[in-house]
Image (spheres, rainbow, N blue to C red):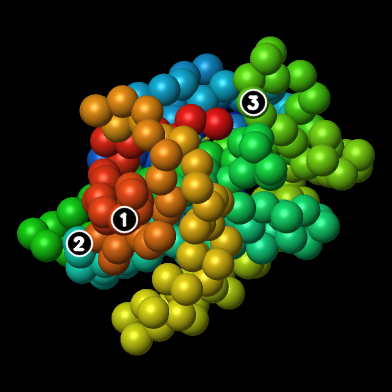
Amino acid sequence: MQIGRKIIRLDSVDSTNNYIANLLKEGILEDGTVILADEQYAGRGQRNVEWLANPGENLTFSFFLRNVNLSVQNQFYLTCIVSISLVRLLNKFGLNAKIKWPNDIYIDQKKIAGVLIENQLSSLTVKSSIVGIGLNINQIEFNGMSATSVLKETGAQKLPMDVLYSYIELFNSNWSQFSEHMLPEIKSVYLSNLFQLNELKKYEDEGGIFEGKITDVLDSGHLIVDRAGIQKKYELKEISFKL
Ligand code: BTN
């Protein structure tokens, strides 16, 4: 199962994830189809936030994986492969990128890419997935947001389309090697690229701001934070990073 045999480029769309979801409903979506848009007018991020990107300057795309066949308890591994492929892509540009749990990509303290994965489940299995990626390429101004782009970090402009082809190649190579017996190895690559792993930093949960150290991420995708010697387990909406 490879992505990118079919690539559809749109001038403008609400959200490339929505576009794929609609094609899926209509039953006319080939496995591995990639949809990219020069402009999204209602781009979506995690935690119901908007994804804003200047038209034509960045990569905003989604792809469809028809036969994911991962058990729900291992669905986090797709997140790992998508994010590790982004880190490797940015490494190729000479950048030291990190994965901010669960799947934001950071350069130092600034976000360069975000991922929104929407899975279609059937009983306890992930049947198919819509993977949406926003990667800042040539944008310079982020209106005070703590964000960056490939151009800001390297000084070099890139054609978003060329970057997309490189990502497709990396993802296909990582995804084609994927099997359940590789889970420990994938997890260790994910952890070795994890932002703030084993560093004492500030976080916020329902009890307020505290200092802690990320020590692990479980197969279920939960984050483990050591807080004064006690290991606490968090879901996405339960903790935020205080950067
Ligand atoms: C996040 O960081 O919160 C996730 C951002 C994901 C943005 C991408 S852009 C392409 C795709 N279409 C969307 O509406 N969202 C994703």
Give the quadrant of residue 153.
top right
* Quadrant of the image containing the C terminus: top right
Give the structural element (helix, strand or loop) at label 2.
helix
- CA separation in Å, label 2 and label 1: 30 Å
Which tag, 2 or 1, sits closer to the chain's start? 2
Asked if disc 3 is less than 8 Å from ligand 1, the answer is no
Give the structural element (helix, strand or loop) at label 3.
loop
Which tag, 3 or 2, sits closer to the chain's start? 2
- Cβ atoms under marks 3 and 1 closer than 8 Å: no
Task: Report the amino acid beneath label 3.
Answer: Ser
Is 68 above or below relative to 157? below
- Residue 219 percent coordinates (x, y): 29, 66
- Residue 194 percent coordinates (x, y): 53, 57
Is 87 above or below relative to 16? below
What residue is disc 2 on?
72
Task: Decide if residue 8 is on the left or right side of residue 161.
Answer: left
What residue is disc 3 on?
146
Query: 24 or 188: nearer the eye?
Result: 188
- Residue 150 percent coordinates (x, y): 78, 41
Residue 237 seen in the current view: no
Task: Report the amino acid beneath label 2.
Answer: Val
The label shown at residue 229 is: 1
- Residue 13 percent coordinates (x, y): 51, 24
At label 3, counting other C-alpha atoms closer than 10 Å, the crowd grade (few under 14, some 14-19, many 20 or more) is few
Task: Report the amino acid beneath label 1.
Answer: Gly
Mark 3 or mark 2, whichever is nearer to me = 3
